[in-house]
Image (spheres, grey):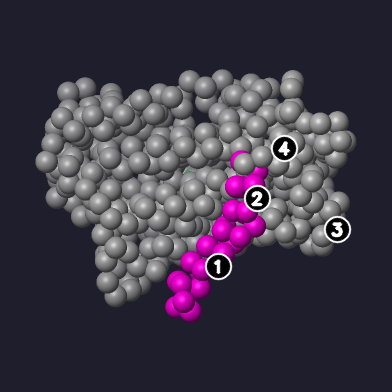
Amino acid sequence: MHTGCSSDQVAILSERVSIHGQWSSRLMFVLAATGSAVGLGNIWKFPYITGENGGGAFVLVYLLSIALIGIPIMVAEVSIGRRGRQSPVNALRALAQDDGGSRFWWLVGFLGIVTCLLILSFYSVIAGCALAYVLRTAGGVFRGVTASGAESIFSGLISDPEKLLAWHTLFMIMTLGVVARGVRSGLEQAVRFLMPMLFLMLLLLVILGYQLHFESFMKGVRFMFLPDFDALTANGILVAMGHAFFTLSLGMGAMMVYGSYLPAGISIFRASFFIALVDTLVALMAGLAIFPMVFASELGTGSGPGLIFQTLPIAFGQIPGGRWVGTLFFVLLVFASLTSAISLLEPAVAWLVENRGIQRIRATVLVGSVSWVLGVITILSLGPWAFGFQFAGESRSKGLFDIMDVLTSVIMLPVGGLAVALLAGWVLSRARTVAELGGREGVAFWLWYLTIRYVTPVSLIAVFLHAIGVI
Ligand code: PFF
């Protein structure tokens, strides 16, 4: 394959080989990485945090974060992964040492593993709810359902620890099954078919919303795209920025580990741009499918994590054939969650295989079990151990679930991302980075390099300082 590198540049390209294998083609990398990026973050989380943070202005900050922080960090993570050809912990240590930096950069990889496990624990609980909704929709539970009916069906599920535990466990077993059977055989094939289906389903829901309730559809569009800067708080900016990491699977090594299986000679710039574009489109479409329904049913935009589970069933209950459209939708949502969940396991699994010599299947079960136990705590915190606190001006009371979310998305991911930006922009050898990124110091390279060196770290630090009231 043509790499676009001169012979000198080839000489400084990494000679490392991954012990875990490689993606079979560029398409497979792009599909797997898009599968990791597109998930509950787009369809469940983006609409509810947009609703809680006032709409348009929040969406604008989110889009800016994707462009100025997300895409540059994705390029950095994938290129570090490909050059290192190991799990993030080992790749970060090796590259920093090769280029004269401290060996303690491995700590960033380790922080990533901890973040992945924490995220997977609650991710699996929400994906479990989506699984439960497959059965409920197929069973016709939502036919003609009202807003308050949908609300009580959801709260019935969320406050029943036994049911949640069963669904959480089932989802975790599905995830472990996929990872243990190997990514190439089952997953690559499925992603190729199911991701476009999910995209089409969302499009269908947007069109349905437009046809069923035109007025509410336009209200939804205005809510999402007309920025009202008075509704944007310092906290909202922080949440938007944190979500850019969450939705693109950045700041914890997931993209880095996928990059470590990427064959040489494939353009990291192009692949990253494409992944971010698809991810953003899916999130915006999910918002356009959900907000018209929120306005049509007079539900509040700030109802939090239950938003999609309370709004979409109303739509499915109203349209002819909604039972089957709804079932298919939740099946696809489960699938999108699965392709994300497996990437949350991968950094830890790869590290255990490399450093502890544990077989892949055992490592998968070990990491999955830790996350499963943490998930049980999340479940208990939604029911028997529930506690809540409400800050002035907030629409709902918050609990352990929200603490985990803030700890991971708003603190740990941006900190991990900042470290990657500093490493790529200031520590690693520019010549080697150029070689990894296609061999030419062209416009694309310089745009990226200046952004990762200055714009990304400065914006990240400024948002943090703003949030704690320093600027
Ligand atoms: N990007 C996924 C989503 O938006 O649902 C979530 C996620 C997957 C976060 C993998 C982090 C990760 F490593």
Other residues around mark 2 within 10 Å, as few (<14) / some (14–19) / many (≥20): many
Q: Which label's residue is closer to the chain start, 3 or 4?
A: 3
Of callouts 1 and 4, the N-terminal one: 4
Q: Give the mark nearest the N terminus, 1 or 2.
A: 2
Marks 3 and 2, how far apart in space?
A: 19 Å
| Disc 4 Cβ-to-ligand 1 distance below 8 Å | no
Residue at (20, 34) in percent of width and height: 209
Query: Considering the numbered disc 4 on the image, is that residue within a helix, a strand or a loop?
Result: loop
The amino acid type found where label 1 is placed reads Ile
Q: Which residue is mark 4?
A: 440
Counting other residues with Cα less than 10 Å from the Cα at mark 1, is it few (<14), some (14-19), or many (20 or more)? some
For the N terminus, the image quarter is top right
Side (left or right) of 317 relative to 276: left
Query: Which residue is denoted by mark 3 in the rendering?
Result: 100
Q: Tell me if residue 252 is in the magenta stretch.
A: no
Q: Earlier in the sequence, mark 3 or mark 1?
A: 3
Vertical relation: 416 (above or below) 353 = below
In the rendered structure, find residue 449 and report the number of the disc placed on it: 2
What residue sits 56% from the left and 20% below the top?
189
* Residue where numbered disc 1 is placed: 461
Residue positioned 66% across, 40% down in the render:
442
Locate residue 299, reporting x and y percent: 18, 51
Residue at mark 4 to residue at mark 2: CA–CA distance? 12 Å
In front here: 91 or 13? 13
Specify start and end residues of the magenta stretch as a single range: 444-471
